[in-house]
Image (cartoon, rainbow, N blue to C red):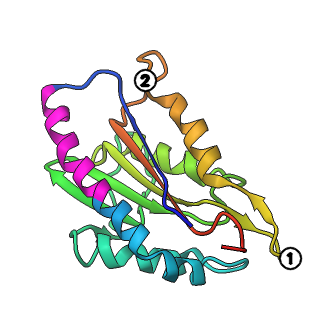
């Protein structure tokens, strides 16, 4: 199976953001370890037609129960935007600083949920970091690979980092994969 991760950070960080990244990277390492340790549970839960809640509950074991992320927290609306943004999980680093964590499944790429999650982090005054947990592969009813979200998400969201001209105000993005690359695993 294998959990992969990708880390993207703005090209230039303030001293406070640099210190903040130590906390964010530590939490990201813990999440990657939890996903790796949960390979078997995730493999059973991640099948064609399953709900994202099946994977979200496995991720919640760590984020909510061990690390103190809130679940389904309503974020402060940005001036001029009434979004009612409610990420799967939210971790407050300090006042008005935090991490959104989203768990996606079937609509990750074909319904642009990855871009919606990045947008949610971008317009939220409470969030500067995003943890995005996506499948290695999604399946057809016959067991074939329909798409490989981790690769697509990592490639397309990387465009928002590394070049100040393209960057948005999200400081960092960590993308994590879960699930089998093929059903023979």
- Vertical arrangement, residue 175 with respect to residue 1, above or below: above
Comparing labels 2 and 1, the label whose residue is closer to the camera: 1
Which of the two labelled residues, at mark 2 and mark 1, occupies the earlier sequence position?
A: 1
Q: Looking at the image, which residue sits at the far right? A: 142
Which mark, residue 124?
none
User: What residue does disc 1 label?
Assistant: 142
Q: 34 left or right of 3?
A: left
Q: Position of residue 6 (x, y in %)?
A: 46, 44
Q: Which residues are magenta?
A: 15-29
Residue at 34% across, 79% down:
61
**Of 26 and 163, the residue lying toward us:** 26
Asked if the stretch drawn in magenta spans residue 123, the answer is: no
* Residue of label 2: 162
> Quadrant of residue 90 in the image?
bottom left
Residue at left 57%, top 67%?
1
Crowd rating for badge 1 (residues with CA inside 10 Å; few <14, some 14–19, many 20+): few
The location of residue 35, given as percent across then percent down, is: 42, 68
Residue at 52% of width from left, 77% of height from top? 42
């Amino acid at each position: 199976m294998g959990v992969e991760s990708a880390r993207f950070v703005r090209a230039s960080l303030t001293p406070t953001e640099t210190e903040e990244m130590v906390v964010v990277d530590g939490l990201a390492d813990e999440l990657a370890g939890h996903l790796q340790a949960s390979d078997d549970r995730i493999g059973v839960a991640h099948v064609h037609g399953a709900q994202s809640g099946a994977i979200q509950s496995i991720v919640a074991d760590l984020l909510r129960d061990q690390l103190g992320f809130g679940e389904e927290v309503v974020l402060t609306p940005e001036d001029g935007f009434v979004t009612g943004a409610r990420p799967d999980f939210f971790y407050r680093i300090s006042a008005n600083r935090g991490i959104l964590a989203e768990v996606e499944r079937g609509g990750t790429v074909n319904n642009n949920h990855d871009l919606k999650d990045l947008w949610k982090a971008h317009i939220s005054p409470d969030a500067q970091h995003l943890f995005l947990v996506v499948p290695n592969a999604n399946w057809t009813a016959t067991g074939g690979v329909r798409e490989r979200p981790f690769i697509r998400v990592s490639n397309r969201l990387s465009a928002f980092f590394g070049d100040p001209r393209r960057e948005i105000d999200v400081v960092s993005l960590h993308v994590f994969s879960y699930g089998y690359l093929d059903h023979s695993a």
